[in-house]
């Protein structure tokens, strides 16, 4: 797949899935701008520059729509259009529903739903100038398909992104902007390391091992595997698919029981 002359925005690309996606797009020769609120972004850009000159980024919180507008203006000085928007930035914090404060609820809603909304709104005018626009939203199997204890806020936001994906796909089809969602199972990222620590701070490795054992492929996914799926959805080869959801989970959502079998 070749993304020469394509311009991509990836939110949350400083680490984890966003980094895997960024690398896949860069390898296919896209120009990529990462938007991330972590200072880690500086190190990521420095590292990526060693192999890819066409990478840059902005430190920004996607809750800040004013700053997003400024960034769009800045990017417009360099780029006439944006071809690919990957709404990847997201947060997850385990907490029981009964104990969850409104602040923790809003932390999820504000970043995972409203942040995705803000970035899409801000970049839409530039995306409309592309002949092959693509929006890829990072939902999850958590929410639309399955859930673990402590994930009510997170699951709610990830399910919301399916509605966002489908409704936006309808509105943007006349502009040939394809909008799809990726639903990952467990991919090995800093987010999953934190979830493991929240579950058992004394033995997070055991939690990760337990996750792997419950997956038919017996391991967590890698950010490169996730990046390859995003690359396909971003490419011109993906030309007749919109409003759809793509599960990448090593089969984790397959088992009907854990007791029946021969
Ligand atoms: N890792 C998994 O197993 C998994 C599974 C399903 C879905 N996902 C989804 O994939 C996406 C990425 O997850 P990850 O595991 O790589 O997470 P991560 O925590 O490892 O990385 C997330 C990145 O997003 C950035 N970010 C978070 N909030 C931001 C904000 N308000 N503004 C700007 N940047 C922000 C962080 O700084 C970080 O660089 C998320 O949307 C997540 O819900 C992950």
Image (cartoon, rainbow, N blue to C red):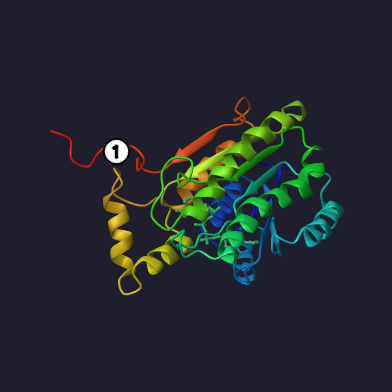
* Residue underneath mark 1: 255
Picture mark count: 1
Task: Please state the quadrant of the image where ligand 1 appears.
Answer: bottom right
Query: Where in the figure is residue 195, as x and y percent of width and height?
Result: 42, 63
What residue is shown at x 58% (from left), y 58% (from top)?
108
- Of the pair 192 and 188, the residue shown nearer to us: 192
**Helix, strand, or loop for circle 1?**
loop
- Report the quarter where the C terminus lies: top left
* Apparent side of residue 169 relative to residue 214 in the rendered image (left or right): right
Q: Say if residue 130 shows up in the picture.
A: yes
- Of the pair 227 and 69, the residue shown nearer to us: 69
- Of the pair 260 and 54, the residue shown nearer to us: 260
- Please rate how many residues cluster around mark 1, counting C-alpha atoms within 10 Å: few if below 14, some from 14 to 19, many from 20: few
**Residue lying furthest left:** 262
- Report the quarter where the N terminus lies: top right
Query: Where in the figure is residue 51, as x and y percent of width and height?
Result: 60, 59
What residue is shown at x 60% (from left), y 44% (from top)?
137
Q: Say if residue 2 shows up in the picture.
A: no
What residue is shown at x 49% (from left), y 49% (from top)?
155
* Apparent side of residue 5 relative to residue 221 in the rendered image (left or right): right
Query: Where in the figure is residue 9, as x and y percent of width and height?
Result: 69, 51
> Residue 65 occupies which quadrant of the picture?
bottom right
**Residue lying furthest bottom:** 202
What residue is shown at x 60% (from left), y 47% (from top)?
25
Query: Where in the figure is residue 217, as x and y percent of width and height?
Result: 30, 44
Q: Is mark 1 within 8 Å of ligand 1?
A: no
* Apparent side of residue 62 relative to residue 186 in the rendered image (left or right): right
- Up the image or down, 11 lies above or below 199; here it is above
């Amino acid at each position: 797949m070749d993304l020469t002359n394509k311009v991509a925005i990836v939110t949350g690309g400083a680490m984890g899935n966003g980094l895997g996606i960024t690398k896949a797009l860069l390898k296919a020769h896209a120009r990529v701008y990462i938007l991330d609120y972590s200072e880690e972004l500086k190190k990521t850009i420095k590292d990526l520059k060693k192999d890819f000159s066409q990478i840059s980024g902005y430190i920004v919180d996607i809750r800040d729509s004013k700053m997003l507008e400024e960034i769009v203006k800045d990017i417009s000085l360099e780029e006439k259009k944006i071809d690919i928007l990957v709404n990847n930035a997201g947060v997850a914090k385990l907490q029981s529903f009964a104990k969850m404060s409104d602040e923790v609820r809003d932390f999820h809603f504000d970043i995972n739903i409203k942040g995705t909304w803000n970035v899409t709104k801000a970049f839409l005018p530039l995306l409309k100038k592309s002949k092959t626009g693509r929006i890829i939203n990072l939902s999850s199997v958590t929410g639309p398909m399955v859930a673990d204890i402590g994930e009510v806020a997170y699951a709610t936001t990830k399910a919301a992104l399916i509605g966002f994906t489908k409704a936006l796909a309808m509105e943007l089809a006349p502009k040939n902007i394809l909008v799809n969602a990726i639903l990952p199972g467990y991919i090995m990222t800093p987010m999953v390391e934190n979830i493991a620590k929240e579950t058992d701070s004394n033995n997070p490795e055991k939690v990760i091992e337990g996750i792997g054992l419950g997956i038919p492929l017996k391991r967590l996914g890698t950010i490169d595997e996730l990046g390859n799926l995003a690359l396909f959805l971003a490419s011109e080869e993906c030309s007749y698919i919109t409003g759809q959801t793509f599960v990448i989970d090593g089969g984790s959502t397959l088992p009907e029981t854990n007791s029946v079998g021969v």
